[in-house]
């Protein structure tokens, strides 16, 4: 599993290595349906053995991007390369790429075994080898004993591994997964996410997964491409996406976040000051860009980085705002507080429930202070 | 509350019995009458048979009078055997040809843009808007030696002598294929249209070319349509009378014609009825066996 192999994984960063050879390349790829651009001039590089996630809201073009790689759609513009070879004009059945479909698309007239063997039979492998590989695949996805069943004799949760085994049986160079876990319940989904990571690492394949579940993308992927309206907004590791989103859209899409808007003001040292729309000034030390004075900008702060207390913070250097507890959600491991500022803005703070009893718990309608360090927030220019 | 819940058990039973009632009135009753006639003896009278029993009085005594003579007669005369076999053969060949012609049509329809499909289905059933008889007559005009087909072929220079298709088994094949084509196309279209395109994409993704995709995915999944269409063509074609009578020649032996001759030319209703009953058995028994076998196969899986 990923955490076991963490040491190996940490050094796996081909995207930071200028000498690394790209495995899959999208170069200025667009796909238009009529006048509507489902994918709009996107460039993207995926490296060998990478677990890459395409993340975005419904209709943003994730499936379309994947289908172009599988060969079911032809790009309206641009080229797609696999190991440096242009895939234009290569039909789906000649691409060393296999896909696990969103609907699974299992052949209803074939048994589980024959579904898995389908691709191997197309390659006219010897019978004995096909049998061995099917058995191996069934073992890999833990479906031994189900081989003789037809898909309609399986539960939805049992069909998912069949679809996975069928797509893996041919040992493709790239496995494409279109929302592979969408039909599973939460618990099974989480287990399967770890199984996918495990599989990807044992088989040493390149996986490209499409999902609109940000937690899933964060769990499985080495890198995530966040998409919106046919464009990739940011490509980065899960930690970078979470801690250093490039835009308000990304910050908002991944996890929950508080966003304050304002204009840039002069500040000392590394920090940037923001005269807020809500009538107070905030300071932030993070942010790739440093917008010019007077320009509009935003600060994004994650709820877990906001401290909530009855007393004003002792350190005057911290950013602090006062408000009233509006709502509390108790989630067991942590509590989430929605605090209403004088301006009416709701700011969210979360607190780990590290102790079973607290001396003076924060309760509804309490007057509280919210505070955070200069480097807790991220400055965003767009 | 749903409809089903508001129904009393009696009402529900009535609902399930309606189809059986129709079957009784429109199939079983005429069948029993025919069966009764087939078991009686010929008489020159009006109607031209001697009833074996009327009413329930003296039923048992009359039952003893039932005669299997007509069946013995049929079994003994090779004419009937030949008619049955020839009918089955002609119907089987016609069904196969109808399938070969109908499958590409249904396939094309199912692949056509969704907006065109209702219109295409309309075209397939359009012939039903004119009389079946007139359409068969029209084929005489096409197939006869000086007919449209020969005129056209002579004009193109493909042949220099007219083809004699009219009054042969070939004409009967053409007639049956033409008339029953919609019954083949519609069930095929229904199964092909339901076929999930993702399955074909999955097959392509796994390395299957166009031909492999057809034989390994499309065709097996359309088998229910193939079966339904074939039965819809085969069963009426076996007993077909009009087409062999109008397009076939004197040597075209089909049981429908034999039956017609017994009824109207020989006025031998009992033998004609026996012929009809045997025809029914010939068709029903294989179908029932087939369905049972299929069901058993389904349960095993
Ligand atoms: N064949 C098509 N013809 C016309 N428009 C299409 C076609 N396929 C996709 N689109 C449009 O392209 C856009 C992107 O579709 P796509 O299936 O890639 O979305 P997605 O990101 O996978 O969404 P989801 O999460 O809902 O699966 C959508 O607005 C969709 O309506
Ligand atoms: Mg999709």
Image (cartoon, grey):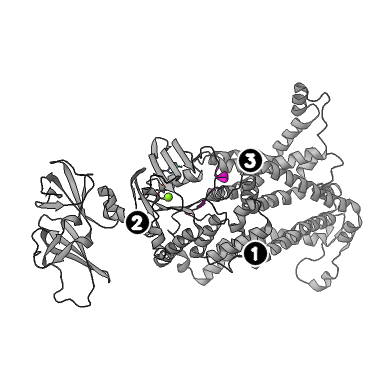
Q: Which residue is mark 1?
A: B298
Q: Nearer the viewer, residue A104 or B49?
A: A104
Q: Which mark is residue B105?
A: 3
Residue at x-position 56% and y-position 48%: B200
The relative height of residue B162 versus residue A363 in the rendered view (above or below) is above
Q: Which residue is mark 2?
A: A214
For residue A104: magenta? Answer: yes
Residue at x-position 22% and y-position 44%: A289
**Residue B246's x, y, as percent?**
78, 38
Which of the two marks, 3 or 2, is nearer to us in this view? 2
Q: Residues within 10 Å of mark 3 (few under 14, many from 20)?
A: many
Magenta segment: A90-106
Q: Quadrant of ligand 1?
A: top left
Q: Provide the chain ID for the residue under circle 3.
A: B
Residue at x-position 87% and y-position 50%: B82
Q: Earlier in the sequence, mark 1 or mark 3?
A: 3
For the residues labelled 2 and 1, the Cα–Cα distance comes to 43 Å
Q: Nearer the viewer, residue A88 or B91?
A: A88
For the residues labelled 1 and 3, the Cα–Cα distance comes to 30 Å
The answer to the question of whether label 2 and label 1 lie on touching residues, with beta carbons closer than 8 A, is no
């Amino acid at each position: 599993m990923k955490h076991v192999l963490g040491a190996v994984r940490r050094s796996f960063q081909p995207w930071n290595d200028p000498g690394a050879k790209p495995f899959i390349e999208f170069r200025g790829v667009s796909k238009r349906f009529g006048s509507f651009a489902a994918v709009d001039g996107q460039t993207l590089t995926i490296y060998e053995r990478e677990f890459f996630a395409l993340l975005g809201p419904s209709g943003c073009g994730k499936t379309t991007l994947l289908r172009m790689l599988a060969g079911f759609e032809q790009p309206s513009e641009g080229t797609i390369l696999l190991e440096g070879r242009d895939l234009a004009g290569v039909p789906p059945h000649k691409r060393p790429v296999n896909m696990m479909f969103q609907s699974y698309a299992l052949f209803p007239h074939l048994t589980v075994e024959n579904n898995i063997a389908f691709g191997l039979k197309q390659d006219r492998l010897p019978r004995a080898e096909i049998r061995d590989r099917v058995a191996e695949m069934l073992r890999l996805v833990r479906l031994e004993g189900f081989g003789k069943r037809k898909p309609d004799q399986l539960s939805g949760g049992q069909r998912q591994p069949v679809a996975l085994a069928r797509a893996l049986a041919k040992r493709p160079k790239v496995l494409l997964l279109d929302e592979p876990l969408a039909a599973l319940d939460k618990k099974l989904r989480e287990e399967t996410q770890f199984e996918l990571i495990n599989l990807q690492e044992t088989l040493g394949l390149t996986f490209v997964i499409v999902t609109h579940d940000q937690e899933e993308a964060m769990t499985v992927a080495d890198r995530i491409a966040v998409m919106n309206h046919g464009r990739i907004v940011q490509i980065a590791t899960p930690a970078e996406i979470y801690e250093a989103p490039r835009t308000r859209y990304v910050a908002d899409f991944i996890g929950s976040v508080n966003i304050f808007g304002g204009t840039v003001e002069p500040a000392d040292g590394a920090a940037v000051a923001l005269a807020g729309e809500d009538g107070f000034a905030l300071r932030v030390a993070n942010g790739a860009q440093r917008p010019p004075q007077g320009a509009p900008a935003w600060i994004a702060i994650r709820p877990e980085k906001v401290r909530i207390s009855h007393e004003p913070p002792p350190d005057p250097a911290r950013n602090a705002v006062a408000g009233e507890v509006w709502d509390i959600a108790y989630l067991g491991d942590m509590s989430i507080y929605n605090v209403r500022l004088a301006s009416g803005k709701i700011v969210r703070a979360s607190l780990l429930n590290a102790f079973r009893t607290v001396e003076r718990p924060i309760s509804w309608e309490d007057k509280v202070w919210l505070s955070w360090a200069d480097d807790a927030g991220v400055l965003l220019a767009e | 509350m749903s409809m089903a819940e508001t129904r009393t058990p009696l009402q529900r039973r009535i609902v399930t019995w309606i189809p059986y009632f129709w079957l009784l009135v429109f199939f079983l009753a005429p069948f029993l009458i025919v069966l009764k006639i087939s078991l009686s003896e010929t008489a020159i009278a009006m109607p031209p048979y001697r009833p074996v029993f009327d009413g329930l009085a003296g039923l048992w005594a009359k039952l003893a009078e039932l005669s299997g003579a007509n069946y013995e007669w049929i079994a003994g005369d090779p004419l009937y055997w030949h008619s049955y076999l020839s009918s089955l053969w002609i119907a089987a060949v016609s069904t196969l040809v109808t399938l070969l012609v109908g499958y590409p049509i249904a396939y094309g329809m199912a692949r056509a843009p969704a907006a065109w499909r209702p219109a295409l289905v309309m075209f397939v059933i359009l012939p039903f808007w004119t009389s079946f008889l007139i359409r068969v007559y029209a084929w005489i005009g096409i197939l006869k030696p000086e007919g449209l087909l020969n005129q056209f072929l002579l004009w193109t220079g493909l042949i220099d002598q007219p083809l004699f298709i009219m009054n042969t088994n070939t004409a009967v094949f053409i007639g049956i294929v033409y008339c029953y084509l919609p019954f083949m196309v519609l069930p095929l279209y229904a199964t092909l249209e339901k076929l999930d395109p993702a399955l074909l994409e999955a097959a392509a993704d796994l390395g299957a070319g166009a031909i492999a995709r057809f034989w390994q995915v499309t065709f097996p999944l359309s088998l229910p349509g193939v079966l339904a269409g074939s039965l819809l063509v085969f069963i009426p074609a076996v007993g077909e009378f009009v087409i062999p009578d109008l397009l076939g020649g004197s040597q075209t032996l089909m049981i429908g014609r034999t039956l017609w001759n017994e009824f109207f030319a020989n006025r031998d209703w009992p033998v004609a009825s026996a012929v009809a009953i045997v025809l029914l058995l010939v068709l029903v028994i294989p179908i029932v066996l087939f369905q049972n076998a299929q069901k058993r196969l389904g349960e095993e899986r």
